[in-house]
Image: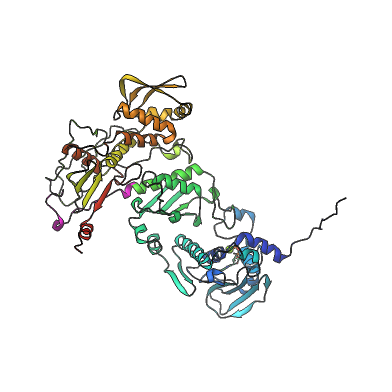
């Protein structure tokens, strides 16, 4: 018989139990900091000062002006499963505070030298208690300032296995800073200061706005044009700020989500955000946003793991739809290149403040290759000069069908994208005037604010068409072909065809299958030539299109005027006019810029006049 290695069952010593628990709660200095600051916030503090030394490994101290801890309860603070925040299991379901397990302080005390000094409001004297690597000391009188000060020294000095996993002091300090920044963004009522290695890194007064704090934390470019995003779906509420796509950067770390006041990192929320930015960013760019989702506590499980920032939503579809819709609206509203009305002294003779300015309204050419029927035009006649123009009555769209709402259709995070609710296109206050075409590709414009605009004719037309398709919705018109086109299908294309069938129909393709190997095309979207149609269908069936929106992107690209095509003046003017009235005109649907502008200042710099 093999030797029996069995050991008898024993209870873990409290020290060991705490150390094991500490492995979950306190992974690194930043997680200690987070626990301490959350405790301070739970205690009603509106001023919190944090200082760290050696990346938090040497010392972390958190001083708050919260309601403090009575001396007789001080020993309980550092006792495992002692908490003032829940009393029974019904409490557990409606937990509103950050902590409630009563584990953090005991855990920290087991892996560091911890001192808690507290003076409850109105008390004459303070009390302090120390825990050294799990050994609890006696409460002692201490100097009194109202509130609580927690000091953690020599973190993990007694747990070499944990020490090994820490990164450099600089990295750990950075993580501490980021962790506190997130808490500061989520708790605007509270003042925060952060000092690292004796140097003050930031100081926020209480009662700031989100914009003020982001201004202090993000570089100026990232904060340029931040737009308010807010909206709700029943008790689900989203609010915050989203960044201008033209200021997007190649780093994903300025995507901040908070759920019921907690910073979280969640794939679903990030996915919804990216979906809203789709078509406005290049593949390597990331959105910048700070968004707060509030929802009933029973709709979300934040307790997946005590130290992780993950959440689980009961109704994922609803959350996804809300985030995407609200962000999309904010981006639509942010619009686009806006040209402020020209100041009288900066006004050149050709700016559109003068009613004579080009292009003349309704200059749509009759014989144009640019089919702009689907885009709206507006009349600029009789507009009072010097004020932004608003049309007397918005032109009636020919496609009045209500757009489906996110939460009413089959749209799911992984499912097909759907038609966003695009607000009416607003003409920018004044029209640019057309100077000429360069390289048969770029239209040179004089913008009403005096700057020089360079418009990519293909990108601009693509955007015009794409927005028109969006408005037209699923009712895609079709133009019958005199001679049907037949295409041979690869088996993989046949599979995709099946999936895309309803969307291709909606985009205006009239199709019939011929067994599994053949496709007959009997009608096309009106803007598409047969040659480009085959090219588009091949691209779509090769996997480039997964939704109707994707088909529209392809269709816009194939139907738009190309780079290298010479445009007659009236064609250029017609494009310019519809483009200027189009939503999201800054970018083509792939996210490339449509307009580059050079301000007077830029020109002066280029000519070294300053
Ligand atoms: P939890 O926060 O989960 O309750 P902790 O171990 O973090 O558990 O804290 C234990 C208890 O100590 C809290 O419930 C709270 O009553 C008290 N406490 C901790 N920090 C503070 C503080 N800064 N101010 C007032 N009370 C505090
Ligand atoms: Mg806590």
In the image: residue 120, left or right of residue 7: left
Task: Specify the principal SS of the magenta part.
Answer: loop
In the image: residue 20, left or right of residue 375: right
Q: Which residue, as the protein is rendered here, is positioned at the far right?
A: 1
Give 416 or 247, whichever is nearer the viewer: 247
Residue 82 higher or lower than 461, as above or below: below
Q: Dividing the image into 4 quarters, which one contains the C terminus?
A: bottom left
For the point 17% across and 31% down, the residue is 366
- The residue segment tinted magenta is 332-355
Measuring from the top left, give residue 110's x and y in whole percent: 66, 68
Measuring from the top left, give residue 328's x and y in whole percent: 38, 46
Measuring from the top left, give residue 119's x and y in whole percent: 56, 75
In the image: residue 408, left or right of residue 582: right
Please tell me how many numbered marks the rendered image carries.
0
Residue 508 higher or lower than 418, as above or below: above
Give 182 or 167, whichever is nearer the viewer: 167
Give 127 or 540, whichever is nearer the viewer: 540
Residue 37 higher or lower than 418, as above or below: below
In the image: residue 335, left or right of residue 104: left
Q: Quadrant of residue 34?
A: bottom right
Task: Please tell me in which quarter of the rendered image ligand 2 is found.
Answer: bottom right
Residue 35 higher or lower than 414, as above or below: below
Q: Quadrant of residue 69?
A: bottom right
Evaluate whether residue 477 shows in this view. Answer: no
Measuring from the top left, give residue 22's x and y in whole percent: 64, 62
**Magenta run includes residue 513:** no
Evaluate whether residue 557 shows in this view. Answer: yes
Q: What colour scheme has been applied to the protein in the rendered image? A: rainbow
């Amino acid at each position: 018989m093999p030797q029996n290695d069995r050991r008898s069952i024993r209870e873990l010593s409290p020290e060991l139990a705490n150390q094991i628990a500490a492995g979950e709660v306190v992974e690194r200095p930043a997680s200690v900091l987070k626990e301490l600051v959350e405790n301070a916030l739970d205690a009603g503090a509106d001023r919190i000062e944090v200082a760290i030394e050696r990346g938090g490994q040497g010392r972390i101290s958190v001083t708050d002006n919260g309601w403090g801890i009575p001396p007789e309860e001080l020993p309980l603070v550092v006792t495992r499963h002692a908490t003032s925040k829940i009393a029974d299991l019904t409490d557990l379901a409606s937990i509103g505070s950050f902590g409630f397990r009563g584990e953090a302080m005991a855990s920290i005390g087991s892996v560091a030298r911890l001192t808690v000094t507290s003076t409850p409001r109105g008390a004459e004297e303070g009390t302090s208690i120390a825990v050294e690597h799990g050994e609890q000391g006696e409460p002692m009188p201490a100097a009194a300032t109202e509130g609580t000060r927690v000091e953690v020294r020599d973190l993990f000095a007694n747990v070499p296995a944990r020490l090994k996993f820490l990164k450099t002091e600089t990295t750990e300090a950075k993580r501490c800073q980021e962790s506190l920044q997130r808490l500061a963004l989520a708790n605007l009522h509270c003042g925060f200061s952060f000092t690292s290695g004796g140097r003050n890194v930031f100081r926020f007064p209480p009662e700031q706005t989100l914009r003020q704090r982001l201004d202090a934390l993000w570089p100026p470019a990232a904060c340029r044009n931040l737009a308010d995003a807010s909206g709700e779906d029943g008790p689900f509420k989203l609010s915050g700020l989203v960044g201008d796509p033209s200021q997007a950067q190649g780093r994903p770390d300025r995507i901040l989500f908070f759920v019921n006041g907690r910073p979280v990192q969640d794939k679903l929320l990030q996915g919804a955000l990216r979906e809203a930015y789709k078509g406005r960013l290049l593949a390597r760019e990331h959105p910048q946003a700070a968004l707060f989702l509030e929802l009933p506590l029973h709709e979300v499980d934040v307790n997946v793991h005590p130290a992780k920032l993950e959440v689980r939503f009961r109704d994922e579809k609803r959350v996804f739809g809300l985030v995407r819709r609200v962000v999309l609206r904010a981006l639509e509203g942010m619009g686009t290149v806006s040209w402020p009305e020209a100041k009288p002294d900066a006004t050149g003779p050709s700016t559109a403040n003068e009613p004579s300015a080009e292009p003349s309204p309704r200059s749509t050419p009759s014989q144009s290759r640019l089919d702009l029927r689907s885009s709206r035009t507006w009349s600029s006649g009789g507009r009072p000069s010097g004020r932004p123009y608003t049309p007397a009555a918005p032109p009636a769209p020919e496609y009045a069908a209500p757009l489906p709402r996110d939460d009413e259709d089959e749209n799911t995070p992984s499912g097909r994208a759907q038609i966003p609710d695009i607000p009416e296109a607003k003409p920018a206050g004044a029209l640019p005037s057309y100077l000429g075409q360069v390289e048969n590709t770029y239209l040179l414009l004089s913008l009403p604010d005096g700057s020089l605009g360079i418009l990519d004719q293909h990108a601009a037309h693509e955007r015009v068409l794409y927005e028109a398709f969006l408005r037209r919705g699923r009712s895609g018109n079709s133009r019958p072909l005199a001679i049907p086109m037949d295409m041979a299908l690869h088996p993989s294309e046949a599979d995709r065809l099946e999936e895309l069938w309803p969307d291709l129909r909606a985009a205006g393709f009239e199709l019939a299958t011929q067994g599994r190997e053949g496709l007959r095309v009997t009608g096309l979207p009106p803007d598409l030539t047969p040659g480009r149609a085959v090219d588009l269908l091949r691209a779509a069936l090769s996997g480039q299109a997964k939704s109707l929106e994707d088909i529209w992107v392809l269709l816009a690209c194939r139907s738009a005027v190309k780079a290298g095509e010479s445009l007659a003046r009236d064609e250029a003017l017609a494009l310019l006019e519809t483009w200027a009235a189009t939503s999201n005109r800054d970018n083509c649907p792939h996210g490339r810029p449509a307009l580059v502008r050079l301000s007077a200042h830029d020109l002066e710099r280029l000519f070294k006049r300053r």
